[in-house]
Image: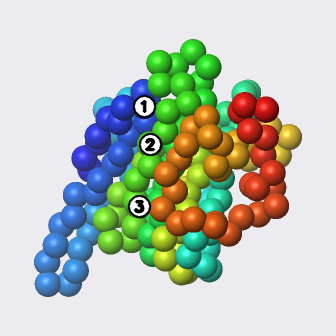
Amino acid sequence: MHFQHTHLQGAWIIDPEWREDLRGGFARSFCAQEFEAAGLPTTFVQCNTSRNTRRGTLRGLHWQEAPFAEGKLVRCTRGAVYDVMVDIRPHSPTHLQYLGLELSEQNGRAVYIPEGFAHGYQSLTDDSEVFYMVTAAYHPPASAGLRWNDPAIAIDWPIGQPILSERDGSWALLTG
């Protein structure tokens, strides 16, 4: 695996190292030793899969409040998504900055999103699927969110008029 720092402290891009032969290919998607060497968590307590039937579906931006904060290792296993993380740590030098990038079945890329970040993604294809591992179990009362189109962050989503849940469309704006 190739680990790449991002401009957001603690957030990483992880690219697979494919081994190809006449049968196809093989790549590791997680290795505790390599994650530990990169300074990333090696214990994940829950794995989740999200399916999105329609292109333009937007999920997010979500996080869990402390003491239930979670880190996430996110990969797109079918189709393609535009994945976004936003640094919401109040004392961070990159507070309210975001990183958006394409995760796809073809590129095999993953991202590690640390605690203190909001996370969301938009499906770029019909029938996309996202698999993610988290460092803390889901605790519904700690669930929080940020409006996907908050002007204080100004995320450049690739598809206008997203398909949203009622909840994701109603999170408060940072500016009130």
> Which comes before the other along the chain, label 2 or label 1?
1
Q: Amino acid at mark 2?
A: Leu
Residue displayed at 18% across by 67% down: 19
Image-quadrant location for residue 55: bottom right
Where does label 1 land, which residue? 8
> Is 103 displayed left or right of 130 in the figure?
left
Q: Residues within 10 Å of mark 1 (few under 14, many from 20)?
A: many
Where does label 2 land, which residue? 99
Q: Label 3 near label 1: C-beta < 8 Å? A: no
Q: Label 1 near label 2: C-beta < 8 Å? A: yes
Question: Residue 46 location in percent, x, y?
Answer: 63, 51
The CA span between labels 2 and 1 is: 8 Å
Above or below: residue 155 compared with residue 53: above
The local secondary structure at tag 3 comes to: strand
Question: Residue 60 location in percent, x, y?
Answer: 65, 53
Q: Residues within 10 Å of mark 2 (few under 14, many from 20)?
A: some
> Which quarter of the image is occupied by the C terminus?
top right
The CA span between labels 1 and 3 is: 18 Å
Image-quadrant location for residue 104: bottom left
The CA span between labels 3 and 2 is: 12 Å
Q: Nearer the viewer, residue 81 or 4?
A: 81
Can residue 155 be seen in the rendering of this structure? Answer: yes
Where does label 3 land, which residue? 103
Q: Amino acid at mark 1?
A: Leu
Q: Pick out the residue farthest to the bottom.
A: 22
Image-quadrant location for residue 49: bottom right
The local secondary structure at tag 1 comes to: loop
